[in-house]
Image (cartoon, rainbow, N blue to C red):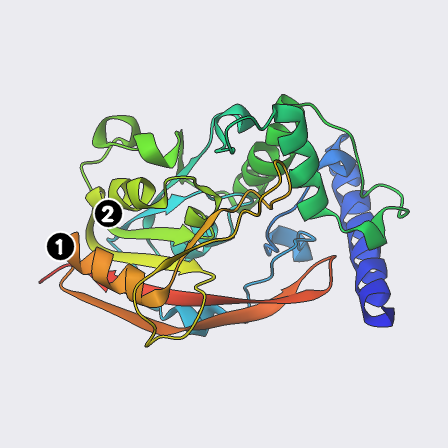
Amino acid sequence: MSTTVSVVEQYAADVAKFNARLQQMGVADIDRYYWYHTVDLAEGLTTPGMYDYRDKLDAFQLPERMDGMTVLDIGSASGFWTFEFERRGAQVTSVDLPSLEMLDRFPGQETSTLLKTIQHMIVPHSADQLEGLVREYSAAELHHYLLDAPFRLCARLLGSRVVRRYSSIYDISPENLGRPSFDLVFLGDILVHTLRPFDALVAAAKMCRGTLIVAQEMPGNPDDAPAMIYRGGEKLGEDDICWWLPNEACFKQVLKKLGFASVEAVGNNDGMLRPAGHWFSRRIVHARRAG
């Protein structure tokens, strides 16, 4: 408990410090933002993100330089991966939902329940009494302050030239992304929030002419039989907008069947979620087309 409290308090202090700097820079509503990712910005600024991947990059085995490569980052949130790919020289397209109304939900789950679930995932009960961390938002407000405004603020402060598109993963296509395909397609913790992960994976695979990277929780052991585990529980609304978790063997077989010549797990991304203070582990899989 003491560890959780200290993490929460440190997170709250980081938020207050960051917000004060941004208010001085003219971002009047900065205290309404939620930060999914920790992103290093200009002038020594760092966003107070829930996920900090900065010292985990080696686990993802990305090319040091990506000059000339085209990258599709699906479900960019605050944009850490988008801006990291761009920093390495890639031409990046970021795609995210146009509205939280389009987020998958179990049949019968209302938008109001969905919003409460997202809020609970962002801020743990141990942080409920910390001023400024818990807010009430409409679906449009939460989309703006969790997904869109943080990304656009980072892009502006970084001088980014990434292309921003809006679509559900099921509907991505050359027409709405502006390219026939990409050298690298990145899926981080996206399929876990889909009711139809196979359809979502197929849609992403169609846009990939090179390497597809999937990074998410994969239950069991690498040598288990291919399976997809149901994680949604039996009560409506009592889930983390997560229902299905394919295991590593399932990903390997399905991706090979989708035309990838080689599929391998390259490592794990392990860390601590802020401000909740609990540990997470994500398996990282690379699927490569022939040639």
- Hey, what amino acid is under mark 1? Gly
Q: Are marks 1 and 2 in contact (CB under 8 Å)?
A: yes
The circle drawn on residue 167 is none
Q: Quadrant of the N terminus?
A: bottom right
Q: Which residue is mark 2?
A: 205
From what the image shows, is residue 224 above or below residue 104?
Answer: below
Q: Which residue is mark 1?
A: 259
Is residue 155 among the parts visible in the rendering?
Answer: yes
Left or right, residue 112 beside residue 125? left
Name the foreground residue: 98 vs 162.
Answer: 98
| Outermost front residue | 234
Name the foreground residue: 277 vs 110.
Answer: 110
Location of residue 65 in the rendering, given as x and y in whole percent from the top left corner: 32, 64
Left or right, residue 108 beside residue 31? left
Q: Dot 1 surroundings within 10 Å: few (below 14), some, or many (20 or more)?
A: some
Left or right, residue 43 beside residue 165? right
Q: Quadrant of the C terminus?
A: bottom left
Location of residue 251 in the rendering, given as x and y in whole percent from the top left corner: 30, 60
